[in-house]
C-alpha cells in the first residue's frame, strides 16, 4: 500500500463537499511531479485530504477507488485524474503549524515542497498524521 496527501482550497472543493459527493475525480493537476504522483496511486491506497490556503490543515482520509485515467476537464493527454472516496473525517484537524513543530515530520513533502498539490507520504509519516488527526 502507498500513502499520499492531496491539497484543495476549501472554497474550490472542501472536505465537506467531498463527503456530500461521496466520490470524485481529482482534477486540475497541472504540475508534472504532482501528475506523476497521481499516476503512482493504486486502487486501495490511502490519501490524506489537506485544506490549503484557508485552514492549512489535514481534515480527513480518503482512498483511491479508481487508478489514473485521462483528465476529462482537458483534451491535453498529459494530464490525468484518479477517483477518490472519503473514508474518515479527522476528529482533530492537523494544522501545518502542528506538522512543522513535530520532529517526526520534519522531512515531510508538505513542509519541504509546500506548493506541490499531490505528494507521497512515508508510512511512518502517514501513521503519525492519522494518529494526530484521530486523537489516538
Image (cartoon, rainbow, N blue to C red):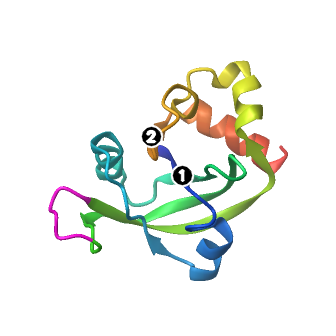
Residue at 42 percent across and 64 percent down: it is 26
Count of all numbered marks drawn on residues in the image: 2
Q: Secondary structure at mark 1?
A: strand
> Disc number at residue 116?
2
Q: Nearer the viewer, residue 37 or 10?
A: 10
**For residue 77, side relative to residue 27 (left or right):** left
Q: Is residue 55 left or right of residue 19?
A: right
Q: Residue at x 72, y 62 (%)?
A: 89
Report the side of 79 relative to 13 (left or right): left
Rendered view: 28 above or below 85: above
Residue 101, relative to residue 81: is it above or below? above
> Does the residue at mark 2 contact the one at mark 1 (Cβ under 8 Å)?
yes
Q: Which residues make up the magenta segment?
A: 74-79
10 Å crowding of disc 2: few (<14), some (14-19), many (20+): some
Q: Residues within 10 Å of mark 1 (few under 14, many from 20)?
A: many
How far from the left and from the top, in percent, is residue 133? Answer: 76, 47
- Please indicate, yes or no, whether residue 1 appears anywhere in the rendered image: no
At 31% from the left edge and 52% from the top edge, which residue is drawn?
30
- Spatial CA distance of label 2 from label 1 is 8 Å
Instruction: Say which element carries label 2.
Output: loop
Amino acid at each position: 500500500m502507498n500513502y499520499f496527501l492531496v491539497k484543495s482550497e476549501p472554497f474550490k472543493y472542501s472536505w465537506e463537499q467531498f463527503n456530500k459527493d461521496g466520490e470524485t475525480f481529482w482534477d486540475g493537476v497541472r504540475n508534472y511531479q504532482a501528475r506523476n504522483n497521481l499516476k503512482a496511486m493504486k486502487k486501495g491506497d490511502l490519501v490524506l485530504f489537506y485544506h490549503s490556503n484557508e485552514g492549512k490543515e489535514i481534515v480527513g482520509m480518503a482512498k483511491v477507488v479508481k487508478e489514473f485515467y485521462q483528465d476529462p476537464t482537458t483534451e491535453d493527454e498529459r494530464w490525468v485524474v484518479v477517483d477518490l472516496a472519503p473514508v474518515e473525517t479527522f476528529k482533530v484537524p492537523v494544522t501545518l503549524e502542528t506538522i512543522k513543530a513535530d520532529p517526526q515530520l520534519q522531512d515531510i513533502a508538505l513542509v519541504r515542497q509546500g506548493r506541490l498539490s499531490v505528494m507521497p507520504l512515508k508510512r511512518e509519516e502517514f501513521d503519525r498524521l492519522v494518529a494526530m488527526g484521530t486523537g489516538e
